């Protein structure tokens, strides 16, 4: 019998945002990455073409991290000693983007400095041609101090600077505006809060096509359902025409999943948890898969095997629909 | 779709005889539409109208229940495309597949291990739902031997897989009296399969590679008298599987399209790459599967899948909570430490499990934070000095302990000053931020 598939006709679309700039565009990247542009819910090619695949960013640090799971340190090995080798290894592992997370202190425990941050960012840019996201350590004052210096030293690169939150966004947005960068705007799993922050940022005169929106997520078992639904609601609001939610979404399943005890701890856990490494990678990849299905445009991951798996899944989801 | 009061009215006798207890047929129709009365209250309604009303009252996605001795697995009856619109109701059944080319010993070992698998997540024991037995040998005796082997190791519901009715017949005999799922009926074998399903009170999976063919087949099978159907629209990789399940769900919910108003079954192992199997199963959980058949049984993959299923199927209106109160962990004595946390299940169990696992005794004060995590509750004003003090007093903690000292979560260190004022005579200590670090903290700092 003939079947008419119900199609959603959405008035709205997600903005298209390009990360990174090549030499011709005023930067030094060997390639740029474009995300967004969706006109329907994720991967529903029968309804409308999905112009850009979701991108994978690999999170690296400016120095060997003290608090990461030993499984991650083992996977990256020597490469994790410094951002240069780490960025190269991440690119080889299949990253589209590099997220450099700046540490709060140096290895000796002294506070990070703008000079050190700039040096780390410049070295990473020189080592690897992928577009870069630079995130502060997550303390307002330090974030502002480091990111302003980084933004000025890398004018025109179209880096993504993060995090902008409701209590701390002005300084970062201002420097991104002055130096031709993008920002990542994070709010805690709520459609209205996300909208509000985007409005505040664009009210400063910052163009919407330079904002990525991070709706926050929890790991599997630690609140993923809230993030999942917040993303579905944001995407639906955007497609329904709400311009302040029509921004590509970036989420951090790597950070969240590797914070969970299931990934962090290998001993003294229930036998039913199974093999530690297998479980940890499943924790990250299953968190990421659920978020991909709910509208993520950029997934920030940590383990190289997770990157491989997600790349395969994204390629499959992006493939032209098979009409049997 | 459910009929409106007016549509129902048109199907009633329209005589206003009042035998139903309502003044008019219209009044009765309105109550029916609001599901406040039963149709049986009207003694005069025609058989034809009854059938139409029953049809319209049926859920858009049929509830299919597989049963075995002491167990059942339900799928279907879903009403929304997105969980935030209401909730997802029936968690997809997770099954593990074995083959009749394996020896009975191999089958029993795998099944026994999976059958006994149990993992605790926020106080809930999560388990697998059942097993699928697939005929690959093409031999009827081997198939029923495999079914018997599974039954010796587990009593959970079964999915019996073969396209050959004769092979299936033997397997069905071995589980007589249960309601398994037969997989399955296709364009060639559907008549014999439908008859088998009817005879054994089994549900029947219907297999076709286009939605059109699938719909044709379910209609034919339904008219042969089998209504508990499950759909396999094909599509073994991520993209096609997502398209199929989305289209089927939309047709059922938005168009009340009966021929596809059944739960969907998926086989993530068929994706080929074993490392992708759990990810395709995750997609199936998020996007509308009713039954999921896995090839690998690996605790490190099953545990996260069971948790994901639990999370996605949590009612968005009701965070999972525990009862506020004073909890005793590892038989604490009066001199043992007092810890404070919130009544969000995930929070409570992160803390309780750490303390319990360390073997150290402690009193755990669980405050009524309306089911929110530490920081969420703090940001929402549901976990402040006042509430903590109220809990400490309300649960008469002072009567149970000899040392008046409470430990608060590291994330809310800012509360310590205020709490000192609210709880005069108590020493306030700030604990670590993460629960994993509590045992070390208790050993070293308390
Ligand atoms: C899921 C979530 C929600 C869910 C709620 C889930 C729930 N039932 O609580 C929703 C979406 C509803 C939500 C709402 C809000 N949220 Co919220 N949310 C989160 C999120 C993503 C995860 C929280 C979580 O579940 N963590 C897991 C649990 C287990 O952690 P936990 O309770 O802290 O417990 C750990 C430790 O504290 C420790 N611990 C616990 N007890 C104890 C006890 C002792 C003695 C010790 C030593 C340790 C200890 O052990 C646990 C494991 O390590 C966080 C961000 C994040 N990724 O962490 C934001 C976050 C908590 N939310 C935040 C905010 C601001 C809000 C809102 C106020 C936003 C708004 N205005 O709407 C609302 C408030 C709610 C309301 N008004 O109704 C902020 C809080 C910011 C701050 N520092 O003040 C956060 C941090 C996000 C952010 N970065 O901005 N949120
Ligand atoms: S009993 Fe039936 S026919 Fe009589 S008033 Fe009620 S609905 Fe109408």
Image (cartoon, helix red, strand yellow):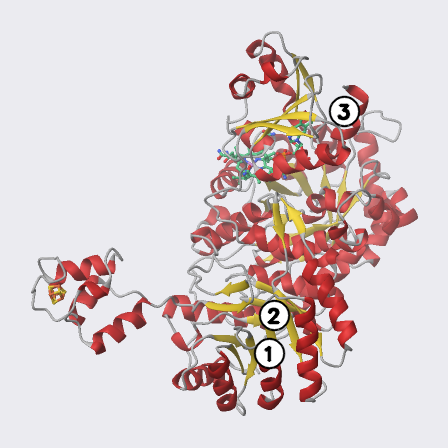
Q: Are marks 2 and 1 in contact (CB under 8 Å)?
A: yes
Q: Residue at x 71, y 58 (%)?
A: B301
Q: Residue furthest bottom?
A: B188
Q: Is residue B96 above or below residue B347?
A: below
Is residue A19 at least partly visible in the picture?
Answer: no
The CA distance from mark 3 to mark 2 is 50 Å
Q: Position of residue B106 (x, y in %)?
A: 78, 72
Which of labels 3 and 2 is toward the front?
3
Q: Going from the N terminus, do you reach mark 3 or mark 2 first?
A: 2
Mark 1 to mark 3 CA distance (whole Å): 58 Å
Camera-side residue: B256 or A81? B256
Residue assigned mark 2: B239
* Chain assignment, label 2: B
Picture layout, residue B430 above or below residue B5:
above
The quarter holding residue B412 reads: top right
Looking at the picture, how far across and down is residue A56, in whole percent? 71, 55
Q: Cβ–Cβ below 8 Å for labels 1 and 3?
A: no
Secondary structure under tag 3 reads helix
Quarter the C terminus of chain B occupies: top right
Residue bearing the label numbered 3: B442
Q: Is residue A138 left or right of residue A73?
A: left
Select label 1 or label 3 by which is in front.
Answer: 3
Residue, far top: B425
Chain holding disc 3: B
Image quadrant where residue B241 sits: bottom right
Q: Secondary structure at mark 2?
A: helix
**What is the secondary structure assignment of the residue under circle 1?**
loop
Badge 1 is on which residue? A322
Q: Circle 1: is it few (<14), some (14-19), or many (20+) Cα within 10 Å?
A: few
Q: Do we see residue A162 in this rendering? A: yes
Q: Position of residue A284 (x, y in %)?
A: 71, 52
């Amino acid at each position: 019998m003939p079947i008419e598939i119900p199609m959603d006709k959405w008035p709205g679309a997600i903005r298209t945002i390009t990360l990174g700039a090549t030499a011709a565009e005023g930067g030094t990247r060997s390639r740029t990455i474009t995300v967004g542009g969706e006109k329907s819910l994720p991967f529903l090619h029968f309804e409308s073409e999905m112009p850009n695949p979701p991108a994978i960013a690999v999170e690296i640090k400016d120095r060997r991290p003290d608090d990461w799971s030993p499984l991650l340190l083992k996977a990256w090995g020597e490469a994790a000693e410094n951002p240069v080798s780490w960025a190269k290894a991440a690119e080889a592992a299949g990253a589209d983007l590099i997220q450099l997370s700046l540490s709060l202190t140096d290895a000796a425990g002294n506070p990070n400095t703008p000079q050190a941050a700039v040096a780390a960012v410049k070295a990473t840019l020189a080592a690897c041609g992928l577009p870069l996201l630079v995130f502060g350590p997550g303390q307002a004052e330090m974030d502002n101090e480091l990111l302003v210096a980084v933004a000025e030293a890398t004018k025109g690169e179209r880096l993504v600077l993060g995090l902008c939150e409701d209590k701390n966004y002005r300084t970062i947005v201002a420097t991104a505006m002055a130096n031709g960068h993008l920002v990542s705007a994070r709010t805690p799993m709520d459609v209205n809060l996300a909208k509000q922050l985007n409005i505040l940022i664009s009210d400063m005169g910052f163009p919407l096509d330079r904002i990525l929106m991070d709706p926050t997520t929890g790991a599997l078992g630690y609140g993923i359902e809230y993030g999942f639904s917040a993303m579905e609601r944001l995407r639906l609001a955007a497609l329904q025409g709400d311009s302040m939610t029509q921004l590509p979404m970036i989420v951090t399943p790597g950070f969240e999943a590797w914070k969970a005890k299931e990934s962090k701890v290998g001993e003294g856990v229930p036998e039913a948890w199974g093999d530690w490494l297998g479980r940890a990678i499943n924790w990250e990849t299953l968190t990421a898969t659920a978020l991909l299905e709910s509208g993520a445009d950029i997934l920030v991951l940590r383990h190289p095997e997770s990157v491989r798996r997600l790349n395969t899944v994204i390629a499959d989801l992006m493939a032209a629909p098979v009409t049997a | 779709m459910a009929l409106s009061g007016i549509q129902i009215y048109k199907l009633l006798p329209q005589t206003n005889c009042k035998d139903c207890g309502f003044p008019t047929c219209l009044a009765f129709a309105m109550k029916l539409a609001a599901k406040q009365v039963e149709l049986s209250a009207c003694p005069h309604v025609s058989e034809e109208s009854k059938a139409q009303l029953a049809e319209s009252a049926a859920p858009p996605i049929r509830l299919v229940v597989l049963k075995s001795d002491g167990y059942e697995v339900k799928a279907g009856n879903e009403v929304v495309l997105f969980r935030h619109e209401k909730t997802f109701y029936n968690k997809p059944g997770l099954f593990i597949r074995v083959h009749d080319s394996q020896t009975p010993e191999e089958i029993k070992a795998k099944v026994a291990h999976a059958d006994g698998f149990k993992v605790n997540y926020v106080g809930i024991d999560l388990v697998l739902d059942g097993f699928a037995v697939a005929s690959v040998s093409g031999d009827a005796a081997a198939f029923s031997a495999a079914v018997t082997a599974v039954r010796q190791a587990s009593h959970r519901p079964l999915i019996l897989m073969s396209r050959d009715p004769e092979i299936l017949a033997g397997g069905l005999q071995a589980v007589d009296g249960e309601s398994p799922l037969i997989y399955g009926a296709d364009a060639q074998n559907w008549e014999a399969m439908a008859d088998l399903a009817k005879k054994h009170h089994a549900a029947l999976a219907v297999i076709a590679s286009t939605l059109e063919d699938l719909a044709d087949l379910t209609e034919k099978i339904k008219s042969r008298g089998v209504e508990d159907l499950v759909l396999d629209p094909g599509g073994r990789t991520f993209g096609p599987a997502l398209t199929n399940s989305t289209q089927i769900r939309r047709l059922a919910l938005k168009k009340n399209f009966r021929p596809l108003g059944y739960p969907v079954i998926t086989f993530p192992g068929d994706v080929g790459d074993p490392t992708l199997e759990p990810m395709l199963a995750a997609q199936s959980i998020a996007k509308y599967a009713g039954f999921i058949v896995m090839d690998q049984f690996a605790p490190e993959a099953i545990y996260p899948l069971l948790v994901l299923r639990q999370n996605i199927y949590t009612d968005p209106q009701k965070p999972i909570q525990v009862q506020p109160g004073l909890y005793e962990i590892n038989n604490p004595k009066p001199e043992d430490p007092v810890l404070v946390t919130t009544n969000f299940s995930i929070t409570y169990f992160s803390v309780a499990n750490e303390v319990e696992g360390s073997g150290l005794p402690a009193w755990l004060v669980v405050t009524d934070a309306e089911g929110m995590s530490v920081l969420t509750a703090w940001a929402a004003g549901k976990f402040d000095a006042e509430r903590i003090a109220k809990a400490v007093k309300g649960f008469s903690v002072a009567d149970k302990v000899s040392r008046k000292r409470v430990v608060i979560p590291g994330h809310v260190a800012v509360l310590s000053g205020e709490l000192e004022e609210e709880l005069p005579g108590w020493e306030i200590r700030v604990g670590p931020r993460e629960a994993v670090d509590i045992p070390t903290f208790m050993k070293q700092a308390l």
